[in-house]
Image: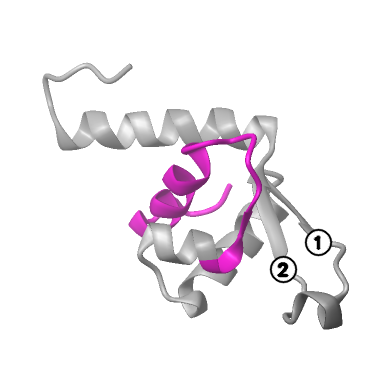
Amino acid sequence: MPRLTLSTQAVLATLLEDPSQPRYGLEVARQAGLPSGTLYPILARLEAAGWVESAWEAIDPVAEGRRPRRYYRLTGEGEQVARIALRDTLRKLTPGVSAS
């Protein structure tokens, strides 16, 4: 199980915004407020744990004028674990408040 640091939780929260929508790394970094040097090791740990899956987009770099992006999304297990972990953190931060 990956360590659920605040940075990891920020990544999970970003991916949970729309779990069916794959997001590329820079997009996740911006939304989570993390530098890429922090983000990519987190994504690698989450992927190794089976919580995140990734795939390279199939584009023609010359036609698009940019390199292919690697897209990330939560797996079914990752979505479940992320929701529980973030709910538990919210409960710890706000005693007496029920988080659904």
Where in the figure is residue 48, as x and y percent of width and height? Answer: 71, 55
| Mark 2 → mark 1, Cα distance in angstroms | 6 Å
- Looking at this view, is 30 or 91 the one in front? 30
Query: Where are the magenta residues, as a range?
Result: 1-26
- Residue at the (24%, 28%) spot, across then down: 91
Where in the figure is residue 4, as x and y percent of width and height? Answer: 43, 50
Q: Is residue 12 magenta?
A: yes
* Quarter location, residue 96: top left
Where in the figure is residue 51, as x and y percent of width and height? Answer: 65, 43
- Looking at this view, is 70 or 3 the one in front? 70
- Residue at the (22%, 34%) spot, across then down: 92
82 over 45 or under it: above or below: above
Quadrant of the image containing the C terminus: top left
- Looking at this view, is 65 or 23 the one in front? 65
Q: Are marks 2 and 1 in contact (CB under 8 Å)?
A: yes
* Quarter location, residue 93: top left
Which three-letter amino acid code belongs to the residue tagged 1? Glu
Q: Which residue is mark 1?
A: 57
Of all residues shown, which one is farthest toward the front?
63
* Quarter location, residue 87: top left
Where in the figure is residue 19, as x and y percent of width and height? Answer: 58, 36
SS category of the residue bearing label 1: loop
- Looking at this view, is 67 or 54 the one in front? 67
Which label was assigned to residue 69?
2
SS category of the residue bearing label 2: loop
Which label was assigned to residue 65?
none
Mark 1 Cα shell of 10 Å, populated few (<14), some (14-19), many (≥20): few
Q: Reading the chain from its start, which is encountered first: label 2 or label 1?
A: 1
- Residue at the (52%, 62%) spot, across then down: 27
Which three-letter amino acid code belongs to the residue tagged 2? Arg
Q: Is residue 60 rendered to the left or right of residue 21? A: right
- Residue at the (59%, 65%) spot, across then down: 25
